[in-house]
Amino acid sequence: MALFLVACMIMLSACGQTADKQASSTKAADSAQTTMSADSRIASMSIHLTNNLLALGITPAGSVIGGDVKDFLPHVKDRLQNTRKLGVVTDPDMEAVLELQPDHIFLDKKYSGTDVAKFEKIAPTEVFDLDEGTWKDQLKKIAAMVKHEAQADTFLKDYDTQRERVKKLIHSKIGDGTVMAVRVTAKEVRVMGMKRPVGPLLYQDLGLKPAKGVEKINKAYQVVSQEVLPDYDADAILVIISKGADAQKVYKQLEGNTVWQGLKAVKQGHVYMLNGQPWLDYSAMGHKIALDNAEQLFSK
């Protein structure tokens, strides 16, 4: 009887050790699934987060596309040839996300903050508030997650070097003159304000002086009538024309307007046409390519 009890105790101990090993293995597997790295299959549900990943040398497995262009943004499209399209941020293709089988999902709080649970059923999900901090802060946050801090440091160092170079180029053309950015869409004319996407690049990174009244536009932009454009009294105007023939038509009409023709910047030849998409892309890659555009434009 004593021998039988000893045998039972040995068997129970062995079973307990096996269960502990199985539990430990399960925990390790779960940990492996939630640990992020540069090799993780990431589904990016924000074009701006996608372009922060690209700045770190990481290509997401899947990404949403630009709503206006119905495709990946032109300035990064060539870098996303093997990336699955996941719809637009306001109407993501959940079936495509599911089929992608991502290891991790990146969300923009503004557009997907109420749908987190839906994405978490597919993969571990990270939510980013792009209104919190700057694109540089977002880049560093992602870099820490994927263990690419060195790449982020290199990118930011190179960006600052280029920023100073472009700043001097612009100054050589317009001096200490005031600047405003105008976006023309198919429906309206907008004066771009102090907030992202355009304001921080122009008035912080490049240190340009906002035209009279621009500093009061504490948001992305202000829709204006053509008649008020002289009130800004800008020495230089940067123009962004939205995609499509209708926006081009609106700009042609604006150019033919006597109000536009009478603007100081127009009369002095200080109207500069920007490659709009990068300037509207508040991300590391967007800002880098916008600087490329400015450097080319003001080197002429």
Image (cartoon, helix red, strand yellow):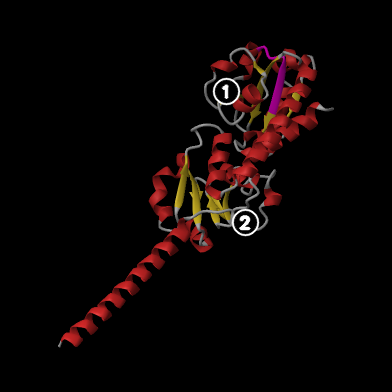
Residue 297 position by quadrant: top right
Percent of width and height locating residue 105 = 49, 52
| 197 relative to 33, above or below | above
Task: Please state which of residues 101 and 231 is positioned toward the viewer in this rendering.
Answer: 101
Asked if disc 2 and disc 1 are in contact, CB closer than 8 Å, the reply is: no
- Decide which of tag 2 and tag 1 comes sooner along the chain: 2
Percent of width and height locating residue 290 = 70, 34
- Total marks shown come to 2
Percent of width and height locating residue 217 = 54, 20
* Amino acid type, residue under disc 1 in the picture: Met
Q: Secondary structure at mark 1?
A: loop
* Amino acid type, residue under disc 2 in the picture: Thr
Q: Secondary structure at mark 2?
A: loop
The quarter of the rendered structure image containing the N terminus is bottom left
Q: Is residue 277 visible?
A: no
Residue lying at 49% horizontally and 45% vertically, measured from the top left? 90
Residue lying at 78% horizontally and 14% vertically, measured from the top left? 267
Residue tagged 2: 83
Q: Which mark is residue 194?
A: 1
- Distance CA(mark 2)–CA(mark 1): 33 Å
Magenta stretch: includes residue 238: yes
Percent of width and height locating residue 25 = 41, 67
Residue lying at 69% horizontally and 51% vertically, measured from the top left? 79
Disc 2 crowd, CA 10 A, few/some/many (<14, 14-19, 20+): some
Report the residue that reaches farthest toward the right.
300
> Which stretch did the figure color magenta?
233-239
